[in-house]
Image (spheres, rainbow, N blue to C red):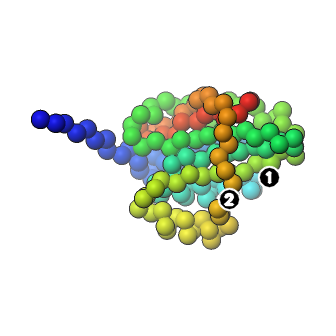
Amino acid sequence: MSHTASQASTFTEARARAVMHHVLADFMLAADAGLIKRETIQKWFDELSYAVAHNVVSSFQLQLKTPDGKRLALNYEVRDDGTVQEGSKGGGFDPYGFPRTTGVTIYVTYRKGAPNLEKVGAWLREHGWGPGGSLVDGNTSRDRAFSKDGFGVMRSKVGDW
């Protein structure tokens, strides 16, 4: 006799939007510190939220590159398996110590085989998103999680903060 365990997805569009609200606080902190224009980061956030709300995002990074080439990131792992129950608030990192010439980008990893991936990919390309970039690797420390009814995002700091 064998048993198979399966976990139903906790994803709903409403849960995804509720969780992303906390991510927006992180993104706006970068703007408040003068690293990127508010309009730019809001546009990126809105477009990323569209992809998350269609359940095609596996993870994403808000990446920082200092003028001397140092790369850091906030890495967000999207989880729809009920394992994220923590309800942190956005923030908890200090972007004000970075030079104003620090570059800010977003890097997204998609769920392989997601039903809406082709549609969302086409929509993002229409809005100027494209291939390129790379994940920031380095020391990783999980520091926050945002969740709504089992759907959530685990945030880690990558690099030497």
Q: Is residue 18 visible?
A: no
**Between 148 and 99, which is closer to the camera in this rendering?**
99
Q: CA distance from mark 1 to mark 2?
A: 22 Å
Q: Position of residue 40 (x, y in %)?
A: 74, 56
Image-based side of 88 in relation to 5, left or right: right
Q: Position of residue 8 (x, y in %)?
A: 31, 44
The answer to whether 77 is drawn above or below residue 38 in the figure is above
Is disc 2 surrounded by few (<14), some (14 to 19) or many (20+) residues within 10 Å? few
Q: Please name the amino acid that badge 2 sits on.
A: Gly
Query: Residue 133 is drawn in which quadrant?
Result: bottom right
Q: Is residue 77 visible?
A: yes
Quadrant assignment for the C terminus: top right
Q: Secondary structure at mark 2?
A: loop
* Residue shown at 76% from the left, 48% from the top: 104
According to the picture, the residue beneath numbered tag 2 turns out to be: 132
According to the picture, the residue beneath numbered tag 1 turns out to be: 37
* Residue shown at 68% from the left, 59% from the top: 132
